[in-house]
Amino acid sequence: MSININKNDVFWSYFAQFINYGSGLMLLPIILHKLPTSHLAIWYIFLAISAAISLLDFGFQSNIMRNVSYVMSGAQKLLATGIDSEFKEGKEINWTLFWSLVSTAKRIYSYISIVVFFILIIAGTYYIYTVTKNFQDQSFVLYSWILYLLVSVVNFYFYYYNPLLLGRGLIREYNITIAFSKATNLLLSIAALEIGLGLMGIVIALFISVLVDRFFARRFFNKGIVKEPEKAKLENLFPILWNNSWRIGLVSLGSFLILRANIFLVSSFLPLSVAASYGLSLQLLTTASSFGMIFFTAFIPKINSSRLSQNLLNIRIIVARSLLISWTIFILSTVALLILGNLLLELIKSKTHLISNLDLLFLALILVLEMNHTLFATLITTKNSVPFVKPALISGILIVLFSFISLKYLKLGLPGILVSQFVVQLAYNNWKWPVVGLKDLGIGLFQLISLPFSTKKNI
């Protein structure tokens, strides 16, 4: 049995992400208008802390999804590294193996959520307290933070539903869940801001949307599956999942240091107004990058399935179309942002503006290269292999180190941070993983991107 992704799945992927990012963009003018700059900066710090805590996933999300795809495609056993060479197409789904994955995933995320709680309540609260010590409304911000950390814990506890839905190829159902959740968040956030709840209102809306998300995810998960067998028959798959998960986790740590850690440095060494502008610019360009990757992300379960059946042509076509779509979306979004970004912000009377056009263009170049090599790196992981742990960690550490030096000692401001990130990534990651990915596909770049025009094969 193979996993099939159809046009309906792709449509819902774009629609849900349109609601996801669109709701953020629709909410942004109201947030910019209603929140003071200091609270906006705190909100971006909340988001940065959330991104940091997501590192505790340790790569289980993508690893569980990949292995679920293998099982749903007929794999009878799972390996710590690589794919079962004895696999034969046409095998029935091993439901005991599937439920073993589910049981292991539930246990993993229950433990992680406990760790998340203690880290946020101790280290997170101390950091927020320190940053807001000169705020007249510090207690209000701290109450908002306490609720936000509880939302993060609840979200983590039920996180296992995401890879289980995606791994089974339930792309439409997964994205319907996102659409309902984000729409709920948007409507409640607008209402909360309009009645003057401010930062606390945004967090309350987020909490309710998380509950909506998990309600729909649970309903969709229970569709079309064989009843769970007795616990005694279930296998503990943690050792198999852990083998690559810790590697992906370290890569995620490197990615965080590369892309997100700078917001902490900016907020520590530069005025909060600069931190808010940088956070806003990064949010908008990251949204463009994420939107560009939607097509590829939707087809990852199909790539996993094609790896098992060794259907290389399918994978080539998916990657080729993904590259063309991601490049087009990101470039058009960047041009629109450069031309219209600050004009629209002035139109809505925003208290925060984008960074300068030169810095914005530089940041866009950094992120498009990041998006490109991330696509190829993700492709490599579909072979159940993670060869880029050390480069990701070393790059992240170097970027943070150089950024710190540029801010504290060289006084280069925001441009120093951007140059640090650009030089370090261009030196290795930006070119290395596309080269490895193309070698794995056995095809050159220009030949690859011409595939969508030279073949009409249905994937």
Image (cartoon, rainbow, N blue to C red):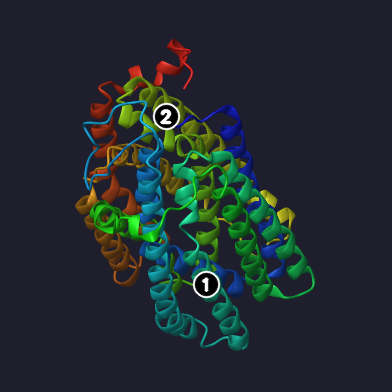
Residue 389 x %, y %: 23, 52
Residue at screen point 36% across, 65% down? 56
Distance in Å between CA atoms under marks 2 and 1? 51 Å
Q: Nearer the viewer, residue 167 or 34?
A: 167
Residue 31 x %, y %: 68, 64
Q: Residue 173: name its quadrant.
A: top right
**Does residue 381 lie above or below 104 as drawn?**
above
Instruction: Work out whether residue 261 can be spotted.
Output: no
**Does residue 154 lie above or below 429 as drawn?**
below
Residue 151 x %, y %: 55, 71
Instruction: Work out whether residue 312 can be spotted.
Output: yes
Q: Nearer the viewer, residue 274 or 229?
A: 229
Amino acid type at circle 1 is Leu
Please state if 341 lies on the left or on the right of 379 as rendered.
Answer: right
Of all residues, the one furthest to the top in this rendering is 454
Amino acid type at circle 2 is Ser
Residue at screen point 70% across, 58% down? 184
What is the count of numbered marks?
2
Residue 87 x %, y %: 27, 31
Q: Which mark is residue 2?
A: 2
Sequence-first disc among 2 and 1: 2
Residue at screen point 62% across, 44% down? 16
Q: Nearer the viewer, mark 2 or mark 1?
A: 2
Badge 1 element? helix
Q: Residue 346: name its quadrant.
A: bottom right
Around disc 2, counting alpha carbons within 10 Å, would you say few (fewer than 14), some (14 to 19), or many (20 or more)? many
Q: What residue is pinned by disc 1? A: 272
- Are the residues at dot 2 and dot 1 in contact (C-beta closer than 8 Å)? no
Q: Which mark is residue 80?
A: none
Badge 2 element? loop
